[in-house]
Structure formats: structure tokens, C-alpha cells
Image (spheres, rainbow, N blue to C red):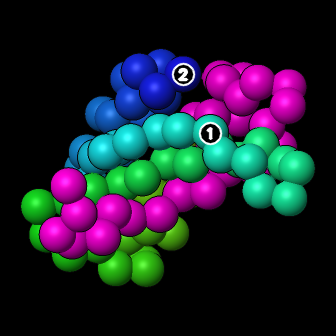
């Protein structure tokens, strides 16, 4: 799923100066959550995450990427200094 999402959204968010660093599924309170971690060579502010999230969510919905058990998508930025 990681490669599929990266290839799906990569070119549509590149104009924002961000890229997908990681994609993984986690479980919280019994619910599976798709996590999309964004990164950039510059600092990512909340407005940029919001703009990228709109694009990513639409692409995920339009292309029916989510597995049946995943009901939530969490998009956030990688902390600077993280490997």
C-alpha cells in the first residue's frame, strides 16, 4: 500500500514542496488508521499540511485505495531531526 499511495499522490503534492516520507497502518482503540507522513526540505506548517491533506484525501477517496477495515486517514509531518 505504501508504494501505491506514494505513486498516487507524489506528483500532485510536489508543487507544495512536500513529499510522502512514510505510509503505514496503525491500530488505535481497535481501529485501523492509515498514517501518511509528509516531509520537506523546509519547515512544514499547519497550512501546508492542510493543503496537502485536501489533495491526498481526495486522491485516496477517488481511487478507492483504502482497505475495508481502514476508516481513518491521519496525515502529518515528520519531525525535523527524525531519521
Query: What is the spatial separation of the Cα atoms under label 1 and label 2, in whole angstroms?
Result: 9 Å
- Magenta residues, as a range? 57-83
Residue 52 position in % (x across, y down): 44, 57
Q: Is disc 1 in contact with disc 2, using a CB cutoff of under 8 Å?
A: yes
Q: Nearer the viewer, residue 61 or 67?
A: 67
Query: From the viewer's perspective, is the residue at label 1 or at label 2 nearer?
Result: 1
* Number of residues whose C-alpha sits closer than 10 Å to that of mark 2, classed few (under 14), some (14–19) or many (20 or more): few
Residue 71 position in % (x across, y down): 83, 44
Which callout, 1 or 2, points at the residue further toward the start of the chain? 2
Q: Which residue is under mark 1?
A: 25
Image quadrant holding the C terminus, namely bottom left
Q: Residue furthest left?
A: 41
Q: Which residue is pictured at 31% across the width and 45% down the height?
A: 21
Residue 28 position in % (x across, y down): 77, 56
Q: Which residue is pictured at 47% across the width and 19% down the height?
A: 4
Q: Is residue 19 left or right of residue 35?
A: left
Residue 29 position in % (x across, y down): 86, 59
Q: Is residue 8 visible?
A: no
Residue 54 lies within the magenta run: no
Q: Which residue is under mark 2?
A: 1
Residue 60 lies within the magenta run: yes
Label 1 SS: strand
Label 2 SS: loop
Amino acid at each position: 500500500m505504501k508504494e501505491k499511495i506514494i505513486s498516487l499522490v507524489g506528483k500532485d503534492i510536489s508543487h507544495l514542496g512536500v513529499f510522502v516520507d512514510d505510509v503505514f497502518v496503525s491500530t488505535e482503540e481497535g481501529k485501523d488508521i492509515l498514517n501518511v507522513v509528509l516531509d520537506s526540505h523546509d519547515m512544514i506548517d499547519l497550512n501546508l499540511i492542510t493543503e496537502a491533506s485536501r489533495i491526498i484525501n481526495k486522491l485516496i477517496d477517488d481511487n478507492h485505495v483504502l482497505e475495508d477495515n481502514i476508516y481513518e486517514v491521519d496525515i502529518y509531518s515528520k519531525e525535523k531531526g527524525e531519521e
